[in-house]
C-alpha cells in the first residue's frame, strides 16, 4: 500500500474551485444548448447563430478538458481515478453520447450516424467511456466534412467503438501521437499547446484501465474507414 | 425534445406526474435542471438551496425523485441529507435518489457509505443522461422489489430464490443479483453456497466485492489471518476498496493486533475521511494503543463531520474527554463531558459519562474526585444487577482498580470472561487489566475459574439434552441465560435445545416464542451469525401454518408468526447489502 502525504487543504481548495468552474461551465453550455435548440425550431436564421454554435463548441472543449483533469490528474501525476466497471447496455452508452452531442452537431449541420447491436452488454466504466467517445466526436467535428459515424461491434472478443468522419483524415503527426499515447510515451505530446495530445493520453489511459482475462484495452487512430476520413477506435476487452 | 426515438421504451415509466426535489446551492444549476425536468414533462418541481432547506421540504412532501448535489456549501452535504432522509424514513422505498457531483469520488464508486443513493451523476448533466439513468434506476427497483420485501421480512432463503428467478430474466443485472444472492446465502447460514457464487464470479472477472466476500467467509470461520491476507490482496489490487480496510482492521482486532488495526484504519480514514463511524473507530483504536495525538485528530474530525449528521456519536465526545485528560487538560475534558451530556440522551450515555469523568480525574492527578466517581459507580453497580456491554465493563473495571477498589472490578471482569469463555483474545485483555492492577496471579485464577463455571453451565445443559432429559435441559439453559445473558454459545445452545424439544415433543407456542426472543437478542448483540439464520429457519419450519385455522392450538400459534415477522429490524440489513460493486 502506498501513502499520500500531501496537504489536504490544498486538495480541498482545488476541488472546490473546480466544482465552481464546472458549475459555471455547465450553466454556460446548458444555456447555449437551450438557445440553440430554440433557434433550430424557428424558421428564420439569426446571424449570431453560427457564433453561438462556435461558443458551444469551445465550451464543450473546456468542459472535456476539465473532466479529464479531474478524472486523472486530481492526484498530480498519479492516476488515482476510482475505476468502476459494471455491465452496461452498450446501446444506452451510445444513446447518452448522442444526446450530449446532439445540439452541437445540429447547429453545425453535421449528421451523426450510429450503429450498435441493441442487446449487446459489455462490462465497462460508463462515465469514462462516454467521456472518451464525446471527446472523439468533438475532435471529429473539427475535421469532418458533414458526417460522423459512431459504430459499435464485437470483434475477436473485444468491443470496438469507432468514431469516423468524412474529412481529410489525420495528419502523420497525429497518427504518430496516437501510437505514442498507446506506448505510454507522453514525450511526443506537448500538453501545453496540444489538447489533442491530452485527449489521446486520456483516452489511452481509459482504454488501459479496462482489463479482462489478461487483455487490456487500447486506442488507435487510422485513416480510411467507413467514411473515408479519420477513424478513432477504442477497443475494450 | 424528441422523446419518441429514445431506446428501451419498455423500461420507461411516466415521469411527468412525479414529485421532484432539486437540491443545489448554485441557482444556475437549479434553473438548468428544472428546465431539463420540464422537458421530460415534469410539473411538480420543488427546489432547495441548502441541506437544511432540503430537510424541511423532505419532511413536508413525499418526493418520488430527489436530485441532490453532493457539495452544498455550509451545513449538511448531500450524503448527510440522504442519510437523515433514510434514517427518518422521509421517502418511500420506491423513490429515486440521484446524487450529483462534479467528480467521481471514492465514496461514490466503492459504496463506502452505509446509505447509498440509487445512482451518481457527474456534471454536466444532459437530459439524455438524466432520462437514461432515471429509467435505469426505475427498472432496477422493479427487479429488486420483491427481493427487498423478502429481506425486510428476514426471509433470506426466499429472497435468494427470487434472485435466481430474476437472473433468468435479467442478464444486465445478473452480477448485482449474484452479489445480493451471495450476501443472502451468508445470512442464511449457507457459506459454502455463497463461496461458490463468489468463485464463479471471480472466474469471470476480478471483482473486489467477490474477493472481499471470500474474506468475510474466512473471518466468520475464525480464520482471521487467512481473512486478513485476502483483504490485503483486495487492497493491493484496488486501493480504493474501503470496505476491505475496515474488514482488515476487524481481523487484526480479533487477533488482538491493535497497532496494525489502527494503522489500517488510519489509511482508510485518509482515503475516505468523511465517515463518522470510521473516524470513531480510528479514534478508539488509537486510544487503545495510547496514540493520543492520532486519537485526538480522529475524534475532533468525527465531531466536526458529525455536526450535521444523523450518524453523530457520543463516542467522539467521550473519546475527546479521555484525550484531554491524558493531556492533563482537565478543564477541556470536563467541557467535552458536559457537551456530551447536553447533546445526547442519558440512555445513550449510560454509565460512560461517569466512568470517563473518573478516568479524567485520575489521569490529571485529582485522586479525590476520581475516587468519588469510583464510589458512585460502585453504588450504581450494587443497585442495578444489569451489566453494560463488554468494552464498558472493562473500562469501568480499569477505573475502579485505579481508584483502589478491588472486589467490584474483579467481579466485572469475571462477568466478562464468563460471557466470552471461548474467546482467548478477550481473556488476554482481561488478564492485562488484572496485571496493571498488580493482581496478575489472582486474575489468572479468577479467569480460569470463570471459564470453567461457564463451560460447566453449558456442558450440564448439553448433557441433559443428550440424555433426553429435554424438560430439564430447557429449564437449565433458561437459568444459565439469566446468569450469563451475553454468552453467545449459551444463547445459541439454549435456542437449539428448544428446537430439539419442539421437534421431539411437538410444537409449543410459548417455547417457540422464547427461542425466537433469544435468537433476536443474539442478532442484536452479535449480528450476522450463521447459527442465527439456521435456527430461525428451523423454527419457521416447525411453526404450524397460522392460516390453518381449524388446526388445534391455531389461536396460540398465530401469536408467534407476527413475532417473527414484525420484530425484525429490516432497514439496515437491506441498505448494507445493496452497496454497489467495485
Image: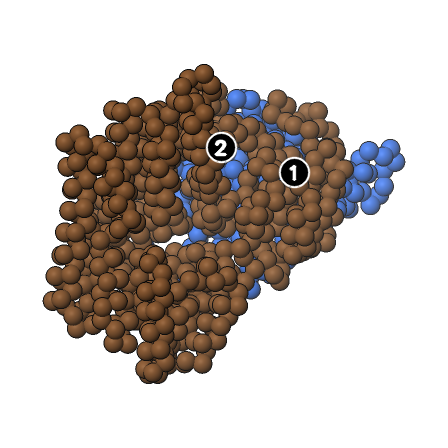
Can you say whether B553 is above or below A103 in the image? Answer: above
Q: Colour of chain A?
A: blue
Q: Nearer the viewer, residue B520 or B17?
A: B520
Horizontal and vertical percent position of residue B1: 74, 32
Q: Nearer the viewer, residue A203 or B169?
A: B169
Q: Secondary structure at mark 2?
A: helix
Disc on the earlier residue, 1 or 2: 1
Which dot marks residue B148? 2
- Is residue A172 visible in this depiction of the protein? no
Residue at image coords 73%, 42%: B45
Residue at image coords 34%, 69%: B379
Query: How much space separates mark 1 and mark 2, taking CA atoms?
Result: 18 Å
Residue at image coords 11%, 67%: B441
Q: Quadrant of the C terminus of chain B?
A: top left
**Number of other residues with Cα within 10 Å of mark 2, as a class: few under 14, some 14 to 19, many 20 or more:** many
* Residue A112 as seen in the image, left or right of residue B328: right
Q: Colour of chain B?
A: brown
Q: Nearer the viewer, residue B117 or A213?
A: B117
Residue linked to disc 1 = B64
Label 2 lies in what chain?
B
- Is residue B431 visible in this depiction of the protein? yes
Amino acid at each position: 500500500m502506498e501513502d499520500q502525504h500531501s496537504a489536504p487543504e490544498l486538495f480541498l481548495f482545488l476541488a472546490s474551485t473546480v466544482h465552481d468552474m464546472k458549475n459555471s461551465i455547465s450553466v454556460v453550455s446548458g444555456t447555449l444548448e437551450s438557445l440553440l435548440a430554440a433557434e433550430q425550431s424557428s424558421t428564420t436564421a439569426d446571424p449570431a447563430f453560427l457564433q453561438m454554435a462556435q461558443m458551444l463548441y469551445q465550451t464543450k472543449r473546456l468542459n472535456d478538458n476539465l473532466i479529464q483533469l479531474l478524472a486523472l490528474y486530481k492526484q498530480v501525476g498519479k492516476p488515482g481515478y476510482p475505476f468502476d466497471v459494471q455491465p452496461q447496455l452498450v446501446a444506452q452508452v451510445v444513446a447518452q453520447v448522442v444526446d450530449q452531442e446532439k445540439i452541437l452537431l445540429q447547429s453545425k449541420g453535421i449528421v451523426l450516424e450510429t450503429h450498435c447491436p441493441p442487446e449487446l452488454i459489455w462490462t465497462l466504466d460508463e462515465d469514462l467511456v462516454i467521456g472518451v467517445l464525446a471527446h472523439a466526436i468533438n475532435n471529429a467535428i473539427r475535421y469532418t466534412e458533414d458526417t460522423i459515424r459512431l459504430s459499435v461491434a464485437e470483434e475477436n472478443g473485444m468491443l470496438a467503438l469507432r468514431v469516423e468522419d468524412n474529412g481529410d483524415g489525420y495528419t502523420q503527426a497525429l497518427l504518430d501521437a496516437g501510437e505514442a499515447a498507446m506506448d505510454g510515451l507522453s514525450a511526443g505530446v506537448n500538453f501545453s499547446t496540444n489538447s489533442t495530445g491530452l485527449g489521446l493520453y486520456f483516452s489511452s489511459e481509459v482504454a488501459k484501465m479496462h482489463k479482462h482475462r489478461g487483455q487490456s484495452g487500447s486506442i488507435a487512430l487510422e485513416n480510411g474507414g467507413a467514411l473515408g476520413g479519420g477513424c478513432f477506435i477504442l477497443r475494450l476487452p | 425534445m424528441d422523446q419518441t426515438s429514445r431506446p428501451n421504451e419498455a423500461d420507461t415509466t411516466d415521469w411527468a406526474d412525479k414529485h421532484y426535489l432539486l437540491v443545489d446551492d448554485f441557482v444556475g444549476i437549479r434553473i438548468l435542471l428544472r428546465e431539463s425536468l420540464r422537458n421530460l414533462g415534469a410539473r411538480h418541481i420543488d427546489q432547495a438551496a441548502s441541506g437544511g432547506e432540503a430537510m424541511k421540504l423532505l419532511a413536508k412532501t413525499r418526493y418520488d425523485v430527489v436530485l441532490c448535489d453532493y457539495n452544498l456549501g455550509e451545513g449538511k452535504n448531500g450524503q448527510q441529507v440522504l442519510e437523515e432522509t433514510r434514517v427518518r424514513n422521509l421517502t418511500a422505498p420506491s423513490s429515486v435518489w440521484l446524487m450529483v457531483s462534479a467528480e467521481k469520488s471514492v465514496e461514490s464508486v466503492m459504496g463506502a457509505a452505509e446509505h447509498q443513493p440509487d445512482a451518481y451523476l457527474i456534471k454536466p448533466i444532459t437530459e439524455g443522461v438524466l432520462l437514461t439513468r432515471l429509467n435505469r434506476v426505475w427498472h432496477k427497483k422493479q427487479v429488486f422489489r420483491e427481493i427487498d420485501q423478502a429481506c425486510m421480512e428476514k426471509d433470506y432463503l426466499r429472497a435468494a430464490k427470487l434472485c435466481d428467478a430474476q437472473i433468468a430474466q435479467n442478464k444486465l443485472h445478473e452480477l448485482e443479483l449474484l452479489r445480493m444472492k451471495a450476501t443472502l446465502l451468508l445470512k442464511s447460514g449457507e457459506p459454502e453456497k455463497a463461496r461458490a457464487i463468489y468463485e464463479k464470479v471471480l472466474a469471470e472477472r476480478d471483482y473486489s466485492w467477490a474477493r472481499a466476500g471470500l474474506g468475510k467467509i474466512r473471518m466468520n470461520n475464525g480464520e482471521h489471518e487467512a481473512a486478513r491476507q485476502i483483504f490485503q490482496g483486495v487492497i493491493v489490487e484496488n486501493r480504493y476498496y474501503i470496505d476491505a480496510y475496515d474488514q482488515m482492521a476487524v481481523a487484526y482486532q480479533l487477533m488482538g493486533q491493535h497497532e496494525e488495526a489502527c494503522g489500517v484504519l488510519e489509511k482508510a480514514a485518509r482515503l475516505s475521511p468523511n465517515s463518522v463511524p470510521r473516524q470513531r473507530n480510528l479514534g478508539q483504536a488509537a486510544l487503545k494503543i495510547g496514540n493520543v495525538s492520532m486519537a485526538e485528530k480522529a475524534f475532533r474530525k468525527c465531531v466536526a463531520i458529525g455536526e450535521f449528521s444523523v450518524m453523530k456519536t457520543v463516542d467522539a465526545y467521550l473519546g475527546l474527554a479521555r484525550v484531554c485528560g491524558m493531556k492533563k487538560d482537565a478543564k477541556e475534558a470536563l467541557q467535552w463531558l458536559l457537551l456530551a451530556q447536553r447533546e445526547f440522551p442519558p440512555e445513550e450515555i449510560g454509565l460512560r459519562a461517569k466512568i470517563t469523568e473518573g478516568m479524567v480525574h485520575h489521569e490529571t492527578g485529582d485522586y479525590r474526585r476520581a475516587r468519588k466517581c469510583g464510589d458512585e459507580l460502585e453504588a450504581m453497580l450494587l443497585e442495578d444487577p444489569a451489566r453494560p456491554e463488554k468494552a464498558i465493563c472493562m473500562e469501568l473495571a480499569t477505573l475502579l482498580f485505579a481508584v483502589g477498589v478491588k472486589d467490584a472490578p474483579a467481579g466485572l471482569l469475571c462477568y466478562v470472561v464468563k460471557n466470552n469463555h471461548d474467546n482467548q483474545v478477550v481473556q488476554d485483555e482481561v488478564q492485562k487489566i488484572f496485571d496493571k492492577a498488580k493482581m496478575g496471579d489472582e486474575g489468572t485464577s479468577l479467569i480460569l475459574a470463570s471459564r470453567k463455571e461457564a463451560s460447566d453451565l453449558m456442558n450440564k445443559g448439553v448433557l441433559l439434552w443428550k440424555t433426553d432429559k429435554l424438560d430439564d435441559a430447557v429449564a437449565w439453559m433458561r437459568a444459565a441465560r439469566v446468569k450469563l445473558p451475553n454468552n453467545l454459545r449459551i444463547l445459541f445452545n439454549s435456542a437449539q435445545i428448544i428446537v430439539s424439544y419442539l421437534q421431539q415433543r411437538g410444537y409449543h407456542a410459548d417455547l417457540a416464542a422464547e427461542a425466537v426472543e433469544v435468537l433476536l437478542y443474539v442478532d442484536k448483540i452479535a449480528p450476522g451469525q450463521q447459527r442465527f439464520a439456521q435456527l430461525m429457519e428451523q423454527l419457521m419450519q416447525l411453526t404450524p401454518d397460522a392460516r390453518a385455522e381449524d388446526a388445534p392450538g391455531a389461536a396460540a400459534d398465530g401469536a408467534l408468526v407476527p413475532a417473527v415477522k414484525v420484530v425484525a429490524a429490516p432497514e439496515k440489513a437491506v441498505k448494507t447489502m445493496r452497496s454497489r460493486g467495485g
